[in-house]
Image: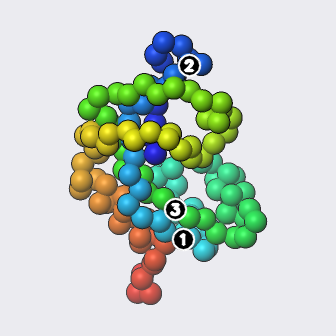
Amino acid sequence: MVAGDRTGTSARDSVRLAHYIEVPGAFRASRLEQVLELDALHVWSEATVRQRFAYREPGLFVLPARVYAMAIPVDVANRPEYEGCKTWVDLGDTIPAAGTPVISDRAFADVLEVIDRAVHPSELA
């Protein structure tokens, strides 16, 4: 996944990608309380979390995203298939994944630990 902004020659012609993410794993939260414990780690409102949790079948996947600032931003052509509300798009081209993490290894390990504790609580807790 690559994050970008609509700068470049024209906001409609290209998208400048300045960041990319790696998703090191996926966690399945089967109880609403598990996801509500992660409030500090996402941007959704509690109402949105509750709505998404109950959509189709109860539960959510939690995808921890490690964000990197790209060493050299890349401009990619904006294609019609990218328009609209999309979660993921296939860029079709290989984008070099070279960059610097925006948070430290320790800070990201802490995030993973918080997620793991919420989704896989110990029976002694």
* Left or right relative to 109: residue 33: right
Residue on which the image places disc 2: 13
Name the spot of residue 53 as percent of width and height, x first. Answer: 67, 63
Q: CA distance from mark 3 to mark 2?
A: 33 Å
Q: Vertically, is 10 above or below 67?
A: above
Of all residues shown, which one is farthest toward the top? 9
Name the spot of residue 25 as percent of width and height, x first. Answer: 42, 64
Residue type for callout 3: Val
- The answer to whether residue 43 is seen in the rendering is no
Residue on which the image places disc 3: 62
Residue on which the image places disc 1: 28
| Residue 2: quarter of image | top left
Say which residue appears at 56% left-offset and 70% top-offset: 29
Say which residue appears at 41% left-offset and 72% top-offset: 117
Q: Residues within 10 Å of mark 2 (few under 14, many from 20)?
A: some
Say which residue appears at 27% left-offset and 39% top-offset: 99
Q: Earlier in the sequence, mark 3 or mark 2?
A: 2
Q: Residues within 10 Å of mark 1 (few under 14, many from 20)?
A: some
Q: Earlier in the sequence, mark 1 or mark 2?
A: 2
Q: CA distance from mark 1 to mark 2?
A: 38 Å
| Residue 43: quarter of image | top right
Cβ atoms under marks 3 and 2 closer than 8 Å: no
Q: Residues within 10 Å of mark 3 (few under 14, many from 20)?
A: some
* Left or right relative to 59: residue 92: left
Name the spot of residue 37 as percent of width and height, x first. Answer: 51, 63
